[in-house]
Image: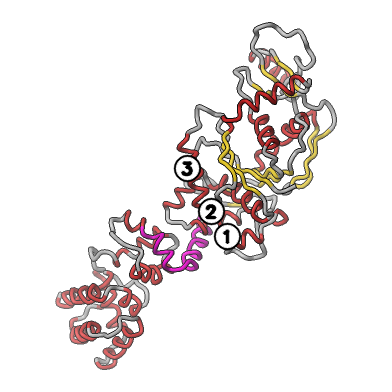
């Protein structure tokens, strides 16, 4: 059987890290096995489902590079199929109408608890034929009455449950709407899903769903229940994928990081999308919960900031600079700034913060740095330095470095006495990359103008 997997979120919210990791493992398994990846939107909760969340989920998956091969498919478009399957089970005697009122069900529950029994449906209407006319009813599936249900899970291994733990659950509510544990089986069976890969919070549902497959005459898929991710909160992890994008994380880095939440390949930490496709397999997915670590995510993102071509970093950086009010193009000059500064930032937002002085001269000078380095006696040397820089034939780091060394030798000054005043003039402080690279990355006229302005600090 060819591999067919599905990611089936509800459109009651945005795509967050936990669900995105589930989508990723489905996607990687499909790609590694040459299979099909399907997006199904479980939108039967009409009060909370929103089209905007559907759009957000699709946008997030596309940004992460996980566009589905089929879908999105919507459950609300399949209601006729669900009702047809309910009728089929009723006709075949594999399901039945239950006329218990909510009050009667609550009384049964309370009695079971009082007697120390598991509170579950008694099966009162399982074999009755004295159906009242025009009375509201639900439809329940006939579960096995004895034996066990075993699944051989790709992650959890062999898991067995005694059927005595289960009851005849509702598959159709009294208002005519089908329930989750029924429609998900109808969907997976009709879509010929071969592997169901989802969080282990669904493991208990699986033992209710397996008998439904058999009742419908379908073979249950292979299951893989992923351990949940610890450390998720509103501030960490459960924020939407778009929140991470807007915080300056790269899609490659987020995918790379999520892949390591439960899966490993030796000691390797950084994976390209192609490597993930080639290497991913469930033999290396662990049973223990993984932990969301923002510091680790920042490190992975910083590594990807260095690995992407500088012109690609510049292209993706543009919107973040525009958000700060800078009018920029992804041209050679911006690429040069990205190349110089990306080692000093973990995200594109941080890159904007540490690089502001390249796009604006509206900054304050560090008073302590000025007092320490802007010495009046060095004015002749700095003026000479500016003069020679302005006359350079080539505006490169090597050419700039030669000028600094020549002026230092002629005026018998250490490099710091020239480099630090330059940094202060160009950036406002002494914290910057190599001064030769810094100067050469600026537009020549802008660098000369700022250095001439810095001469005023010598007079002060």
Instruction: Please check the rendered image and state whether residue 196 is part of the magenta-colored stretch, yes or no.
Output: no
Bin the neighbour count of mark 2 within 10 Å (Cα to Cα): few under 14, some 14-19, many 20 and up.
some
Asked whether disc 2 touches disc 1, contact meaning CB atoms under 8 Å apart, the reply is: yes
Residue 328 location in percent, x, y? Answer: 31, 61
Residue 234 location in percent, x, y? Answer: 48, 43
Tag 2 secondary structure: loop
Task: Left or right? Give the position of 149 relative to 336.
Answer: right
Q: Is residue 37 above or below residue 168?
A: below
Q: Can residue 229 be seen in this view?
A: no
The Cα atoms of the two marked residues, 2 and 3, are separated by 14 Å
The Cα atoms of the two marked residues, 1 and 3, are separated by 22 Å
Tag 3 secondary structure: helix
Q: Which residue is drawn at 14% across and 77% down?
A: 459
- The residue beneath circle 3 is 56
Residue 416 location in percent, x, y? Answer: 31, 82
Task: Left or right? Give the position of 207 relative to 311.
Answer: right
- The residue beneath circle 1 is 273
- The residue beneath circle 2 is 65
First to last magenta residue range = 294-318
């Amino acid at each position: 059987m060819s591999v067919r997997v599905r990611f089936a979120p509800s459109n009651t919210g945005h795509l967050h890290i936990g669900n995105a990791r589930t989508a990723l493992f489905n996607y990687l398994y499909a790609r590694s096995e040459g299979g099909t990846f399907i997006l199904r939107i479980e939108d039967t909760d009409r009060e909370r489902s929103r089209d905007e969340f559907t759009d957000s989920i699709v946008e997030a998956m596309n940004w992460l590079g996980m566009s589905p091969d089929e879908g999105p498919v919507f459950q609300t478009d399949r209601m006729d199929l669900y009702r047809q399957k309910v009728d089929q089970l009723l006709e075949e005697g594999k399901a039945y109408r239950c006329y218990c009122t909510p009050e009667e069900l609550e009384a049964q529950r309370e009695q079971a608890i009082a007697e120390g029994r598991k509170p579950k449906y008694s099966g009162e209407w399982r074999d009755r034929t004295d159906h009242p006319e025009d009375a509201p009813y639900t439809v329940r599936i006939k579960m096995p009455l004895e034996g066990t249900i075993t699944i051989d899970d790709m992650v959890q291994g062999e898991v067995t449950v005694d059927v005595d733990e289960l009851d005849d659950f509702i598959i159709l509510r009294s208002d005519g709407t089908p329930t989750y544990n029924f429609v998900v089986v109808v969907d997976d069976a009709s879509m010929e899903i071969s592997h169901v890969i989802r969080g282990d919070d669904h493991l208990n549902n699986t033992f209710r769903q397996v008998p439904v497959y058999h009742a419908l005459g379908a073979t249950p898929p292979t299951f893989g229940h992923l351990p949940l991710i610890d450390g998720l909160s509103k501030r960490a992890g459960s924020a939407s994928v778009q929140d991470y994008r807007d915080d300056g994380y790269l899609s490659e880095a987020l995918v790379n990081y999520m892949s390591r939440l439960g899966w490993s390949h030796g000691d390797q930490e950084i994976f390209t999308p192609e490597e993930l496709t080639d290497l991913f397999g469930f033999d290396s997915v662990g049973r223990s919960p993984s932990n969301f670590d923002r510091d680790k995510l920042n490190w992975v993102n910083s590594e990807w900031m260095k690995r992407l071509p500088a012109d690609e970093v510049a292209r993706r950086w543009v919107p973040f600079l525009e958000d700060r009010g800078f009018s920029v193009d992804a041209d050679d000059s911006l690429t040069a700034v990205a190349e110089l500064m990306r080692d000093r930032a973990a995200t594109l937002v941080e890159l904007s913060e540490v690089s502001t002085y390249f796009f604006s001269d509206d900054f304050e000078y560090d008073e302590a740095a000025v007092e320490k380095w802007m010495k009046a006696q060095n004015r002749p040397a700095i003026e000479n330095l500016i003069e020679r820089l302005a006359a350079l034939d080539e505006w490169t780091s090597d050419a700039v470095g030669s000028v600094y060394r020549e002026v230092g030798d002629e005026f018998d000054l250490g490099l710091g006495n020239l480099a630090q005043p330059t940094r202060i003039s160009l950036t406002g402080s002494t914290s910057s990359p190599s001064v030769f690279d810094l100067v050469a990355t600026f537009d020549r006229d802008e660098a000369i103008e700022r250095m001439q302005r810095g001469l005023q600090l010598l007079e002060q």
